[in-house]
Image: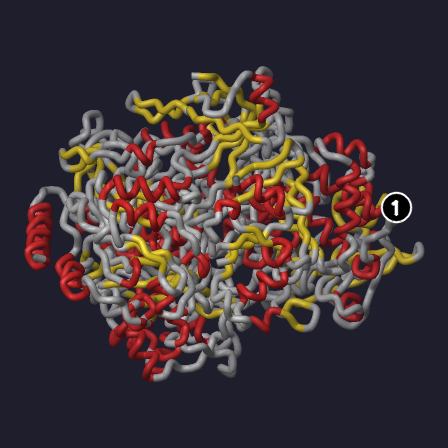
Amino acid sequence: MAEHRAARNTRRIRRRELLAGGALLGTGALLASQIKLGEVLGLIRRAEARELRPGDYDLANPENILYSVCQQCNTQCGIKAKLRDGVVVKLDGNPFNPWNLDPHLPYRTSPFATAAVDGRLCPKGQASIQMAYDPYRIVKVLKRAGKRGENKWMTIPFEQAITEIVEGGYLFRHVPGEEHRRVEGLKEIWALRDPKLAAAMAADVAAIWARKTPAEKRQAVEEFKVKYRDHLNVLIDPDHPDLGPKNNQLFFLWGRLKGGRGELIRRFTTDAFGSVNAHGHTTVCQGSLYFTGKAMSEQYRDGKWTGGRKFFWQADQESAEFIIFVGVNPFEASQGPTNRAQRIAHRVREGRLKYVVIDPILNRAAGTMAWKWLPNIPGTEAAVALALVRWIIDNRRYDERYLRNANRAAAASDGEPTWTNAAWLVKVDRDGVPGKFLRASEVGIAAREVRPRSDGKGTYEFDPFVVSVDGRLVPFDPYDARNPVEGDLLVTTEVAGIKVKSAFQILADQARARTMSQWARLAGLQVKDLVEVAREFTSHGKKAAVDIHRGVSQHTNGLYNCTAWYALPLLIGSFDWKGGMVPGSTYDAGGGRPGQPFALGRLHPGRTTAFGISIIRHDVNYEDTTLFHGYPAKRPWYPLASDIYQEAIPSAGDAYPYPIKALFIYMGTPVYANPAGHTNIPILADPTKIPLVVANDIIIGETSMYADYIFPDCTYLERWEFAGTQFSMPWKVQPVRQPVIAPLTETVRVFGQEMPATLEAMLLALAEKLGLPGFGKDGFGPGQDFLRAEDLYLRMVANVAAGERADGSDAVPDADDREVELFVKSRRHLPPTVFDPDRWASVVGARWWRKVVYVLNRGGRFEDYERAYEGEQLRNKYGTLINLYQEKTATTRSAITGRPFLGVANYTPAPRDLLDRPVADKGYDLRLLTHRVVFHTKSRTISNYWLLNILPEGEFLMSSRDAKRLGFKNGDRVKVISAANPEGVWDLQHGRKKPMVGTLKVIEGIRPGIVSFSLGHGHWAYGSQDVVIDGRTIRGDPRRAKGLHANAAMRTDPVLPNTCLADPVGASAVFYDTQVRLVRI
Amino acid sequence: MVIDGQKCVGCQSCVVACTAENVLPPGVSYRSVPEVEVGTYPNVKRYPMPTQCMQCDKPPCVPAANAIAPGSFSKRPDGIVAIDYTRFRGRTAYEAAAKACPYRALYFDDGKFYTQPTPAFQPYEEAVSHDYGRRWVRERGRRDDPPAGGGRKCHFCLHRLNAGMVPACVSTCIGRAVYFGDKNDPQSLVNEVLTKKADKVLRIRANRGTEPRVYYLCDDVQLSTSVHT
């Protein structure tokens, strides 16, 4: 009987396989490497009535388990994937990985012993199976058969797509209106190919920027044009050589990207192709928070502020006694939930930790076990911080000893791992605005010294900084390790005609600009609560921390808000202390550390130098470039930021500072993700704006639907990456993502190698066709080929395995024979296109192979639990100067107003436009917010039906008081409209409009005056709509179309109507400063 | 099982883990975590309440089910209330048992699949499940083959217990809110927790006399009782 059933089912599958198509997973044959249905049914024959014996639970058999890293959100928790016949059927947490188990297992534990130990994992991680086995996944290359965004596609061979993109031509003759449109291929855009010439030009462009006056710059440009007269054709504009070469007109934009793929994209785009335009999405995440971290970590080197790290601090929830969470959702988001809830919940329950949530919405952390929930008015986050700062300074509850330390020696003598510039004297102008630090030569107390540069290229002049001690000025070197210098904290004085204040005084002035009552009223909170929080924060020694995220940073005053909040842990000096502020720490995978075998930076023959202003105009001062013509500039410039997502497509649309010819988008959906992302649609849909758009995606998504080509990619369960860390985790780690299941995309041939269609295959194939240096035979160097993805990633695993000491004492052990056997056996289901143990061993060599196996058998490398701390401090420290006052910020100007930014914590009202004018939309009385729920992430969890069970259409929250006042009730269907979008629709082009309609959920747990929608629903692609492929309609799944996505209501900037509001300093895209009205429908 | 409501963060990982572990179809969810909001702005709290079959010592579902489908329900020596899928067939038997259960623990499997209404059915939906120590495969088009066409409920992941592991909901709980073990064993964690916090223990609808084997810890027993009911 069972046999018949098996046979019948097998025949049914074969019939389905005969259907034409094959572009989507669902319309064609399931690949042979997937589960063989007959084998599954055969199990029934064997086992129907038999009781299971303990050994029968095959999911606890180590040969059926692989460790990797989740990517259902950006927390990048470990996963333990359990397989049956090559199909992943269950995911749990990786017990080796501190994200999933607290305390995590010792690294040397055998993977044979961990088979029955499941770590923890959030619901999204548990649902990953549905992300991978998604019927709407693309498995073949799609080329548009109609206009951009018409949702008409045809499958084409991979090789044909590569050829068309490289060669260019009349690629869209089949589309009415595009018969005569010739597309420039990559080979034409790759204009400058000589690395020596590129390096010389780059240096000369830097020299143009170094000239002081516009006249001197013009002169330098003329000299440049003469020097390079035979090569002017490689430049975008010879009159503006600082725009760089035409190569810059290739733009690679990504959404969610981690290490490994990051190295590959930069290698291709920048080091080989020579374009500066490889940018990510940071500003829609928590941009201004990252760039606050960068500003606070700038170090004074070779006469400049430089080396600021793109990072931020989070709370050590493993050991803190008191945490202030602001605009953070640690149980649902904020690089939680699994790693954070696991540590916070039980410590709160045991009375070892107390926390406050300051957020307008009662998120799960606020509602379940918070000591206090303080729902502030959005945009007033700095006001709340400054109230606390004021109370702490007025009541002298700051760590004076810590703050007085002006240099390294002073900190060391107090046993402090960090020090600040709190005592340093800052020059203040006539209007009381602080600017640059005072220098010794300005007040004649010491001379400038000539010192060698740290890069060995010459000398620079060091002019000591100055503090005041009992009225006496003292010069010092911030990094002097021998002579401790301390300074008074509250200093206001005048010297040699120069007004000066200490940085701490400047902070105190900001905090004292209002009384506690005034701050409280501004923020919509009670003084009593603020005082209790400030008292509690200063009652736990160093075991108190501040943890902030998008609720603080994604406003027009974002960077200032973040700076204000970080002033608090500076006041108690809890950086690098157990229970305080953690910077995060990773094992380097790039090979730049001593003892590591593969230094990727050096493994690039023919590597070139990219140069020029980027399309997002970052990391350079407008005034330094040849484009400077006074204020306002055409669009904002962002010298202090990078990865400015909201600028990407609108800048290309405005061709400012130059047009883009080819845009590649990887795992990103700026249309869905950006506030006012709908403004990106008309730009993308118009082939004259960006002539070539190529997406690399697993699905036809809300942005990739507007591409010319979509290349299929593999999901996180099928591929590699190096996930890095999160800033609340004190252990040094490097989680490694590796193939767990056979790839579901088609197999293609690149460099003579068979491999699945992935991002790697696409880039390698383009490199092959172009002949890009650093790829293919001898791509890494003589005898070191780069033909396949693993050629890069295995080398990186070897770097991680090696650790960071030249003597090799930091290397992991060799895997023994049993572990090597397990390694191979547990990958028996993987096809040779992704797994070949002999080939893998030859990539890294015999010396490193068993160490690579050791790391991969554990899903990465994780420092042991007891290594988190050294006594009462973190082992992995930040360990240097932290800027309480940011001189670099204070000497940077807005390219729109021409006014300098502020280098100190301050309250600047929000929202303001780029001209610094308040944005006031009369008649729109509700503040629109968006929030995360633990069940969803961005655009990509809509395919997870198990998660849709929990929240089928998202939630759209309104306060019961507003409902009463406005006459709404629970369940009402309403449309969201704003001044920027009075029609309340997404205009998807081609006559399709999607109204922003949601179902109200009336609750108590939200500040009145605010409505908020959860992110992840309201789709119009991603399998929710019908698409046509090769003439066949693939029906969308209406379960995916539900809910509200109201980003298109979010405020555009009155100065820049094709772009959302943004923070002019830290570049955050603004999600939380829009006023809306709801219309019942 | 002991559930510390104070540590539950309402993430529902237990729900999804259970669904994946037991290959549950649409309409069947052995575990659920309803959430209640209590209070008035700004004094508001959220109470997530994980719930599933309580494996009662006096299970009302057993006589109710067996009256319609003899021998379909039984109370095992280890405490789990077991369903024989080959005997517990059809809506009538299901509705009788479901009506008797005060905890809404029973669900009807009517043979659906998540990816059936899409362009391609996916292989993980026909993976083997192990309810009550046997192997089951649900196939498309076979809505009357057990477990489809009958009622289902939580069984404390008996197949994992047999392998020396805790239920899927327990191991994945990110709030560390769920304890599991042998209450009679004086060394067990559940015993320790129930003893130490005896004044904070409650069982849901204990007044129905079902003797549930799932205990809840809450600081405010009175509040939690009213929330549960």
- Location of mark 1 (residue): A492
* In the image, residue A40 above or below residue A623: below
Q: How many marks?
A: 1
Q: Residue A720: image x %, image y %?
A: 35, 61
Along the horizontal axis of the image, is A485 left or right of A451? right
| Figure coloring | secondary structure
Q: Residue A578: image x %, image y %?
A: 67, 64
| Chain assignment, label 1 | A
Q: Residue A648: image x %, image y %?
A: 44, 39
* Residue A181 appears in view: yes
Out of A534 and B124, give the one closest to the viewer. B124
* Residue A332 appears in view: no
Seen at 45% across and 63% down, the residue is A119
* In the image, residue A877 above or below residue A650: below
Out of A692 and A1063, give the one closest to the viewer. A1063
Q: Residue A38: image x %, image y %?
A: 13, 59
* In the image, residue A759 above or below residue A146: below
Quadrant assignment, res A362:
top right
Out of B7 and A297, give the one closest to the viewer. B7
| Local secondary structure at mark 1 | strand
Q: Amino acid at mark 1?
A: Thr
Along the horizontal axis of the image, is A597 left or right of A594? left
* In the image, residue A552 above or below residue A764: above
Seen at 24% across and 61% down, the residue is B135
